[in-house]
Image (spheres, grey):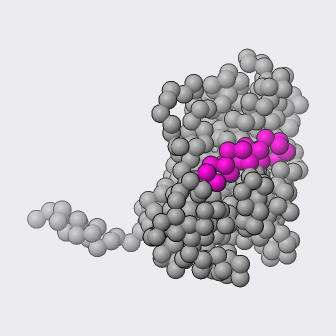
Amino acid sequence: MPFSQHILDNALGAVGNTPLIRLDRISKAEGLECNLLGKLEYPSVGGSVKDRIAKRMVEAAEKEGKLIPGYSVVIEPTSGNTGIGLAMACAVKGYSVIITMPNKMSLEKEAALRALGAEVVRTPTEAAWDSPESHIGVAQKLQREIPGGIILDQYGNVNNPLAHEYTTGPEIIEAVTSTPATTDKPSSGKVDALIAGAGTGGTITGLSRAIKKIHNKACIIVGVDPKGSILAVPDSLNTADVGAQYIVEGIGYDFVPDVLSRNEIDYWIKTADEEAFEAVRKLMRLEGLLVGGSSGSSLSGALRWLQETDEGRRIARTRGANVVVLLPDGIRNYISKPWFLKMAMGAEPSPLAHRITAILKPE
Ligand code: PMP
């Protein structure tokens, strides 16, 4: 289904419809017998899983008569990817956009936003969510002052989880159920476990609903939350690292957004930056996938769940069980980040690199 071959009306026609990809080399290296599958979201036209909610929130607001071309100013607090999706949708539809975004988010996201015509306001990363200086507080102040200002509010908008319940989830189910089991690639024919990080929580909540309601009630939904965030349940998981800063972008918060329905998540894993970046390296080197930092968090959370919990170990040992890992965006959002430059440019020279140096050395 990805990239159907007909003419699309505009960029919004190329949102979603992303591939589900076997991660066989990682699975083998980790000694797993189940199928490890990556739902790869960077091929979506704006580069992330958040294109889906941006499109749906804008189209829903239009239907409700809340957006007026040439007058409305869409204002949104975001870690960047929702902003990019909104700026793309609003470029096509003729609305102005202001994005408020904490300082820690990458220069690449700000540049993409500005290139799409959005105004960008940076806010202190350490500001509490309910303080007037936070990205949320600043967006609210701007909305009060700017005529036509409207916050679509990904933290509370039902169209956020609905976008995943109606698109991301069904795409995963369709890919799994339409791929026949073979002798060398056995399959249970269903999604047995799904692992995703949570920022607003819209992705994991919508996926849980799609899978449990219409496909497999017994599917285990695992949420991944960075150390320093407070989204995980039970709360005792969060207390060890209260207030710790983390570098990974797009996941974790200091409040529980309304769209995150934590009682629809079966299990939580806390992850650290270093293990996330190591998992990004695995996805690049072993699978050829140029994913971003939170994809590493998803993978490392998945591997920890499969290796460290009873239920996870049972699934890891089951041939044909399908374990889906959500990979939300791509590395092109993070090229200038020190953690990535160190990984890409700071590696020890390989034997091949030494050979090249020797060959090219002046006589
Ligand atoms: N990863 C990245 C890179 C993101 O931008 C986001 C969105 N904040 C997420 C993960 C988490 O998605 P959600 O907000 O749906 O929980």
The dominant secondary structure in magenta is: helix
Side of 17 relative to 356 (left or right) = right
- Residue 266: in magenta span: no
Q: Residue at point 42% right, 61% down? A: 345
Q: Position of residue 360 (x, y in %)?
A: 18, 62
The quarter holding residue 229 reads bottom right
Q: Is residue 93 above or below residue 353?
A: above
Q: Position of residue 148 (x, y in %)?
A: 82, 23
Q: Is residue 82 above or below residue 273?
A: above
- Residue 167: in magenta span: yes
| Residue nearer the viewer, 103 or 260 | 260
Q: Is residue 139 above or below residue 66?
A: below
The quarter holding residue 354 reads bottom left
Q: Residue at point 27% right, 69% down? A: 352
| Residue nearer the viewer, 292 or 224 | 224
Point out the stretch of residues depicted in magenta.
Answer: 155-174
Q: Position of residue 333 (x, y in %)?
A: 56, 49
Q: Position of residue 76 (x, y in %)?
A: 76, 38
